[in-house]
Image: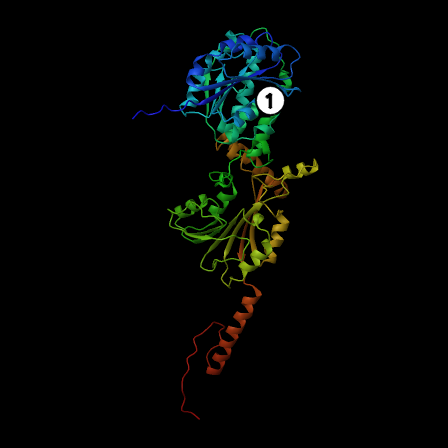
Amino acid sequence: MRVAPAPKPKLLVFIIAYYAEATLESVLERVPRSVFDQYECEILVVDDASEDRTFAIGRAYQRSHPEMRMTVLRNEYNQGYGGNQKVGYAYAIAQGFDFVAMVHGDGQYAPEELPRLLQPLRDGEADAVFGSRMMDRFGALKGGMPVYKYVGNKILTTVQNAMLGTRLSEFHSGYRIYSVKSLERIPYRLNSNDFHFDTEVIIQLLNAGERIRELPIPTYYGDEICRVNGVKYAKDVLWATVQNFAHRSGLLYQRRFDPAIDDNAHYDAKLGYASSHTYALDAVAKGSKVLDIGAGPGALTRELRKKACDVSVVDRHAPGVSSLDVKVIIQDLDEPPKFDARPYDYLLMLDVIEHLRDPERFLEQLRQQFEHEPKKLVLTTPNVAFVVQRLMLLGGQFNYGKAGILDRTHTRLFTFRSIRHLLRDAGFRIKSVKGVPAPFPKVLGNGLAGRAAIAANIALIRLSKTLFSYQIFIEAESTPGVDFLVRDAEVRSAVRDAAAVAGAPQNGAPAKIAVTSSSTR
């Protein structure tokens, strides 16, 4: 039986063009015809409202090459470098392509390199491939890149690598090939229409966990007109990188840097540095019984089990702890507690209270289970009075996001004072309160830079806990509710009365009353 050949991947060669009448036809001629053999290929030319003959030349080439699948479009109004890319990527997604390769219509990037650059995508080894002019030492200079651009490229790339935790040789090449599925997973439509669109796409790919591969390409600088304002471009690139740093730190949510992935990765454990999870883990005694209320993915549970703790977890979704010999209680915490807190030594509520619709009622219902023996509560919550939030509010911004203090799933926000009042009203004796620094190592890594940022934040917390704490950490003890005290008083009073009648010592402790007969009348 003859096996049908596998279908060819669908490739869109996307040529962005702006005032490219002198070079467009040459670029089209240089597209290797082998890509039409290896891929189900279409060429898309998008002229960004040029007032020369760019569009007409593209149309003429299309008519003279009927054997080539080709589309030529013109934006009625100039969209900018980034805006023009949005048009092409939206076209690629709508038409169901597998890959989209961006080639510049001015001939600065060699179309002849397409087959080699496409290979990692076709082999499933990458989600995006960038042609880098900096991988061959001094190759860019030999290819005519001006020295000031070469130095600026190197400086910007070094700074961005440090802030993004990457090792790319170049952030500023315009030779890009993307998996269309990867583009679908990032909010590229929210990006700038300006030249730093490319930097924002890199950041989005990194945040989405996409695989980026760099391959060397030759550098060519001809007599094309440079339309990039270098100073403005550098400022925009750095500002976008700083914004992403703040976003990943949970300090300032940026919607465009939030990949469209539905997961709980941002609720992972923050361990190995000063954090709410580290403080909580240190607060729990080895070998104790722990009830983790709102356990999330369960990363902290693994660390508690390493301390020989007997752990039970409560969450609305089953955490991935099936192999850890823990009890799992499935419950929506906006409902009355279905679990019994009495057998446990520690109750953990780490970044939970702010998610509840009615935390006062939840704590009151929980308190109904408490008896005279105190339970140790370890609680953390974001500090809405953090300096970044204050500055945002001063600037008229109060934007909810996917993570951080203004996580859009947060329904209640607390300061040090308000969370103290909430716990005291719920009958807890507060034993200690301290501020938690922002999780800088999540962005900078747990190396020198991350630890230095943490140390600086801790120093600022010593100056003003309310102003510089990213989170609030509280250790408290439970006290019994009034209803329990009434019942307990009734039982103990009855015991005292019975003991008095029997002539037993009235030491206040519950006693077993023996009923005996007497012959004395």
SS category of the residue bearing label 1:
helix
Q: Amino acid at mark 1?
A: Gly
- The count of marks equals 1
Residue 358: horizontal and vertical position, in percent? 60, 53
Looking at this rendering, what residue extends furthest in the bottom direction? Answer: 521
Q: Is residue 81 above or below residue 506?
A: above
Asked whether, in this view, residue 411 is left or right of residue 134, the answer is right
In the rendered view of the protein, which quadrant contains the N terminus?
A: top left
320 or 288: which is nearer to us? 320
* Residue at the spot 50% in from the left edge and 30% down from the top edge: 448
Q: How is the image coloured?
A: rainbow
- Whether residue 428 is visible here, answered yes or no, is no
Residue 469: horizontal and vertical position, in percent? 59, 41
- Whether residue 193 is visible here, answered yes or no, is yes
Asked whether, in this view, residue 38 is left or right of residue 239, the answer is left
Looking at this rendering, what residue extends furthest in the left direction? Answer: 1
Residue count near mark 1 (Cα–Cα under 10 Å), binned few <14, some 14–19, many ≥20: many
Indicate the quadrant where residue 81 lies.
Answer: top right
Residue 298: horizontal and vertical position, in percent? 45, 45
In the rendered view of the protein, which quadrant contains the C terminus?
A: bottom left
* Residue at the spot 55% in from the left edge and 11% down from the top edge: 63
335 or 426: which is nearer to us? 335
Indicate the quadrant where residue 201 lies.
Answer: top right
Q: Which residue is mark 1?
A: 82
Residue 174: horizontal and vertical position, in percent? 54, 17
Indicate the quadrant where residue 17 lies.
Answer: top right
43 or 223: which is nearer to us? 43
404 or 203: which is nearer to us? 203
